[in-house]
Image: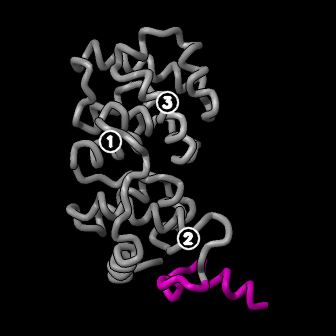
Amino acid sequence: MLTKKQWEFCLEQFGEMFPDAHCELVHDNPFELTIATLLSAQCTDVLVNRVTAELFKKYKTPEDYLAVDVEELQTDIRSIGLFRNKAKNIQALSQMLIDNFDGEVPANRDVMMTLPGVGRKTANVVVSNAFGIPAIAIDTHLERVAKRLGMNRWKDSVLAVEEKIMRWTPMEKWTDTHHQIIFFGRYHCKAQNPGCNVCPLLPLCREGKKRMKANAK
């Protein structure tokens, strides 16, 4: 397993490789980011941005999403996976924002998680990027990187990954670290064909060393 000292080295490398890592979901306010992140479940940011480029022109407020039938909203996001459930959640979320929060997204992770369709990852993304509250949002890229490196065991839960990264990473670096590891996983340590042969973390990476050894045979 990776040691805390080794993790500190990893953090330095993530920062050097991707100093400008950022949220790639295009948005102008917390509400748009909440909708975009909800749509991004089991979907790429590229596709979400393609859909929201038109969606956010049509719908500006929670009231706008409630002014149409759910079937129309489903049509607007049809190219995104699970579009039927996501459309229902968007309208239910919009109604709850109006009823309980004066139409504004609450700047609190636990409260935000009471909104329909908003889980821990979505709430962490929104509070960190829209409200500047330090958070680690675990997506598929971040989970893969942590487990490949040996930060966590493969059988560990997503919550276990989040908790360990938070323990071993200074709080003021949580949001930047979150983005940098996602970029590392999305553009370097890919699910398929990871860049092990040019990776500065190869000496520490249990999976990378296995892969390189297998390829050498």
Q: Which residue is mark 1?
A: 126
Q: Is residue 203 magenta?
A: yes
Q: Does the rendering let one see residue 112?
A: yes
User: Where does the image place residue 2, in percent across and percent down from the top left?
Assistant: 44, 78
Residue stretch rendered in magenta on the structure: 197-217
Query: From mark 1 to mark 2, how far is it between C-alphas?
Result: 25 Å
Is disc 3 in contact with disc 2, using a CB cutoff of under 8 Å?
A: no
Q: In terms of secondary structure, what is the magenta stretch mainly? A: helix
Write the residue at 56% across / 80% down. Answer: 206
Q: Is residue 8 magenta?
A: no
In the picture, measured across the screen, residue 122 lies left or right of residue 88, that is: left
Query: How many labels were placed on the picture?
Result: 3
Q: Earlier in the sequence, mark 3 or mark 1?
A: 3
Per the image, label 2 sits on a secondary structure element best described as: loop
Q: Amino acid at mark 2?
A: Cys
Quadrant including the C terminus: bottom right
What number is the disc on residue 160?
none
Three-letter amino acid code at disc 3?
Glu
Whether residue 164 can be seen here? no
Mark pair 3, 1: CA separation: 21 Å
Residue found 36% across the figure and 33% down from its top: 32
Instruction: Give the CA separation, mark 3 to mark 2.
Output: 32 Å
Residue 36: x percent and y percent? 44, 37
Q: Mark 3 — residue?
A: 54
